[in-house]
Amino acid sequence: MIQYRGIKREEIDRGLFAQFIRHQEVTDCWRREEGQWVIRKDPFTDDWSEADYDKLIACLKETLDTGGFVLGAFQEGNLKGFASVEAAVFGGEQGYLDLSSIHVSEDMRGKGIGKTLFLAAADWARQRGGRKLYISAHSAVESQAFYRAMGCVEAEVYHRGHVEEEPYDCQLECLL
């Protein structure tokens, strides 16, 4: 049984991710070419290094320190999914709140955890006065299928920092 709860700042350390498997084998990705979205073969393995975990831990702590939201999905006390939303509204009339992370452990994908986390993040953003969630999303075909199923579309306004940091991500939004 999966239990969902907010993650406290003092819990966020490398040990929190001890049973979390980020691994993803990617074969096809969405790419924007000449103004059109196309699927291209771009096989790679996505996994987190220790440096990636260090960055993630710092980012999640910063999210909480600035009033944001971090929700975890736990099975038998082990983190199996999480989502975070930043507190600051941006994008002018778009009223974006940034879904800064959403990940499900490889061993738990396809069980509805991502959907539950996404809907909880959207609810939190709506309660904070956001009009839309902003997502700088992995371009893998499987990841994009998830976001499309959640009602996401291409963002009307791109967040420059996200584009610069992850140029192959798809910039999406979801009306709250």
Image (cartoon, helix red, strand yellow):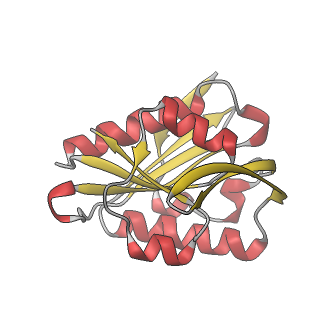
- Residue at 63 percent of width and 53 percent of height: 139
Q: Is residue 139 left or right of residue 121?
A: right
- 69 or 114: which is nearer to us? 114
Q: Quadrant of the N terminus?
A: top right
- Seen as rendered, the residue at the extreme front is 34
Q: Residue at x 37, y 54 (%)?
A: 155
Give the residue displayed 29% in from the left and 60% down from the top.
Answer: 87
Quarter-of-image position of residue 137: bottom right
In depth, the one of 8 and 124 nearer the eye is: 124
| Image x and y of residue 104, in percent | 65, 42
Estimate the x, y position of residue 169 in percent, counting from the top left.
57, 61
In the rendered image, the vertical position of residue 5 relative to residue 11, given as above or below:
above
How far from the left and from the top, in percent, is residue 52? 69, 71
Residue ID at (80%, 50%): 26
Q: Position of residue 174 (x, y in %)?
A: 35, 42
Where is residue 47, by image quadrant? bottom right
| Count of numbered tags | 0
Q: Is residue 61 visible?
A: yes
Give the answer, above or below, for where 132 lies relative to 12.
above
Name the side, left or right, on which 40 lies relative to 153: right
Res. 78 visible in picture: no
